[in-house]
Image (spheres, rainbow, N blue to C red):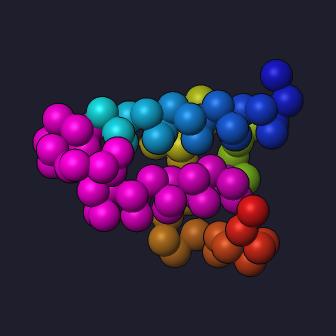
Amino acid sequence: MDTQSKREREKQVVSLMIRLYCRKNHRAKGPLCPDCAALDAYARQRSDCCPFMETKTFCSNCKVTATGPKCGSRSAG
Ligand SMILES: [Zn+2]
């Protein structure tokens, strides 16, 4: 599996986890409450620019924090 596919797959998994969590804990009317929608967007953006995608298994293992390399220098897309 190439890195791009791995990123996409991770994004799907993260989104699914956030959706399940939100449904269970926040009972949002839509797919996601505003807080979880923001979290989902952030997680996806982070996955896009994670430098450890090759070696790690999941972004929760990622050492990149808010003080780490800046995300978002690339245009979102
Ligand atoms: Zn929520």
Q: Which residues are magenta?
A: 21-50
For the residue pair 71 and 29, the one nearer the viewer reads as: 29
In the picture shown, does residue 66 fall above or below 25? below
Asked if residue 55 can be seen in this view, the reply is: no
| Residue 9 in the figure: left or right of residue 15 | right
Residue sitting farthest toward the top: 1
| Residue 8 in the figure: left or right of residue 67 | right
In the rendering, at what x and y percent does residue 56 appear? 63, 35
Q: Is residue 7 magenta?
A: no
For the residue pair 31 and 19, the one nearer the viewer reads as: 31
Q: Residue at x 35, y 39 (%)?
A: 19
Q: Where is the C terminus found, in terms of image quarters?
A: bottom right
In the picture shown, does residue 62 fall above or below 58? below
Q: Residue at x 53, y 43 (%)?
A: 59
Q: Residue at x 48, y 39 (%)?
A: 14
Residue sitting farthest toward the right: 2
In the rendering, at what x and y percent does residue 67 appear? 52, 74
Majority secondary structure in the magenta region: helix
Q: Is residue 22 magenta?
A: yes
Q: Residue at x 72, y 32 (%)?
A: 6
